[in-house]
Each structure stands twice: as C-alpha cells, then as structure tokens.
Amino acid sequence: MDGLGRLVPSARSLLIFEAAARAGSCSAAAREFNLTQPSVSRNIAQLEAHLGVQLFTRSPSGLALTAEGQMLHRAVADGFRQIEAAIQDVLALRTRKEVVELSLSTAFVTHWFIPRLPDFQAAFPSVDLRFQLIGGTLRGAPGNVDLAMRMASPDEADRLSWPFAPELIIPVCSPAYLAARGALDSPARGRRHVLLHLSDTQYDEAMLWGGRLIREPGTTRIAFSDYGVVLQAALKGEGVALGWITVVSRALIDQALIPASARRVHTGRFFHLVAPKGRSLRPLVLAIRDWMIGQMRDDMERLGSLLAVAEPAGGA
C-alpha cells in the first residue's frame, strides 16, 4: 500500500475515477460524492497528469474510457468489490446472532413457546433459535442440541438434567364446548362427550380419563399421533383433550382452554431440561435454561388454585 500512495495522488481520486467511469459522466459522479462537477473534473485531470496517460475521451455526450482507462477501471472496480465484501463480513461479525438449538415437542413449541416469543426476544435479542421438533412423546437421547426437554430417569448418567415441571394431566376443552356439553362428570342432558386422545402414550385410557367415562355408552374417542393436533381440535371446540400442564399452562392462563372436570392426574414423573454430559455449556444456554424454568414456575404459581384440586393417578 505504500507503493500505491506514491502512484496516485490520493485514494479519493480512485473513488471519483471509478464513479465517473461507471456512470460515464462527471455530473453523475459529482452527485454521488456531493461535489461540484468542476471539482470531479479537476480530480480526474490530476489523476491523469499524475499517471501521464489519458483515461477518458470527452465529448458533449459524456465520458468514454480509453484503453488505459478501461485497464485501470477493471482493476479498481474489482478491488472496490472485494473491499465492500470484506466490510460487509466485518459488520456481520459485529451483528451476528448466536445460535441456540432446542429439542422440544411440536405441541410445546406451538402452545407454550411461541406465545412467549416476544418476551424471549426481549430477554435474548442476540439469539437465533433453532428448534428440533418431536411430534409424539418426549423420548430418546437429546442428540446434538444445546437443550432438550425429556422425561428424565435417574439412571441416565449420560445427561445433565434440571427439573422443569411435573407430569400433571388435566382434561381441558374450549369454553364453548363446556357450555354446550357440560363437564365430564356431569354432561348436559342427552349430550355425549368427544374425547380427543394422543395415540402415542404409555398410559391406558382408563387411568387418564377414568374408567366410568371410558365405559359410558355413546362416548366418542378420536386418537391423533401428534399432540399439537389434539390441542388444536380442543381449541376449536371439537372435544375434550388431556392437557399436559407443560403444554397447556399458557392456554389455561389465557382461558382459551379450561378444565373439563375436577380430575387431575399426577403421574409422579417429572419433565426435565437436559443436555449431553461432557459438553461445556455456554453461559447463554444456561441463561435460556433458567428463563424457561422461571417461566414455567410463574405459570404454575398463577394456576395454583386450579391445579390444587387433585385426583391420584388410577382414580375411577
């Protein structure tokens, strides 16, 4: 670069030359740099005098590059493009967001996480989230993600694990469905219930719904393999769904879904946030873990009285 400083009057003269060559006009180059047309002409003339060659031929219709001018313009334009690309890369490094990948159920993301995205983005403005979605039951290794939600077992020594929420299951429905058909324990006269069920579950229906309800003539059962679809049907008033509290807490708070009976099933198990052991967790991932646990804790506190009416697993 020391040599370039001796070869041209200034770097500014190359910028003005490139603009005039690109536009074919001193006036256009003057507008680009907020200069006067005579000032641009003087800069080009000084560059030509310094190099000892004519770079443009001038005519009433504008400027045309000479052979020497074309040679210089190709080199200057290529150099400026590389400089522009490098500057954009530097700026991208300054503004690049940190990626965090989460392995969660489709239903949890749809009904718990997405309603909180504005709060998450306010808390973590420099994060790009990536979701690895699971359609059914949360089983299996967390894989190569930063955090996952799983039903953790004590013998899973390959994972770091933090309690998130109990497995608490509540029959839920839309307010309109409850008004039309009544509660599960006291249906409106002549109206049978539609039970929306997740097919991929290890629990039997009698334990979840109660044996009397399952045996009741006229009860309709519809099974889905994706829990997100189960809840969507319930939100639209198509039936009663089993609401895992980890997914329906926000809908219960907003009263988009309401309890369909006093039944509460506590399985005694717990959902955990987990991460592969042996990986150094970034402070940002730990902060997101704490934010999710805090949000769930707040939900449970707000729903305290609603969750207090409990019925043990296996009740009739």
Image (cartoon, rainbow, N blue to C red):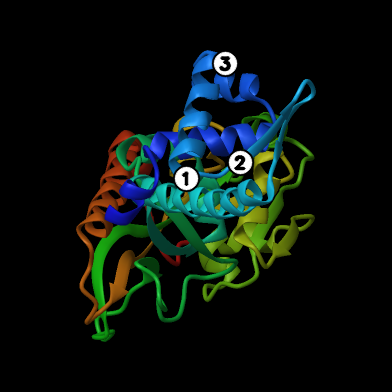
| Labels 1 and 2 touching (C-beta < 8 A) | yes
Q: Residues within 10 Å of mark 3 (few under 14, many from 20)?
A: some
For the N terminus, the quadrant is: bottom left
Q: Position of residue 297 (x, y in %)?
A: 27, 45
Of discs 1 and 3, which sits in the foreground?
1
Q: Position of residue 97 (x, y in %)?
A: 38, 50
| Labels 2 and 3 touching (C-beta < 8 A) | no
Given the image, on which type of amino acid does mark 1 rest?
Answer: Leu
Question: How far is disc 1 from disc 2 in space, using C-alphas?
Answer: 9 Å
**Sequence-earlier tag: 2 or 3:** 3
Q: Which residue position holds label 3?
A: 37
In this orientation, does residue 262 appear?
yes
* Near-viewer residue (33 or 154): 33
286 sits to left or right of 229: left
Q: Which residue position holds label 2?
A: 55
Q: Residues within 10 Å of mark 2 (few under 14, many from 20)?
A: many
In this orientation, does residue 257 appear?
no
Q: Residue at x 47, y 40 (%)?
A: 14
Q: Residue at x 41, y 34 (%)?
A: 12
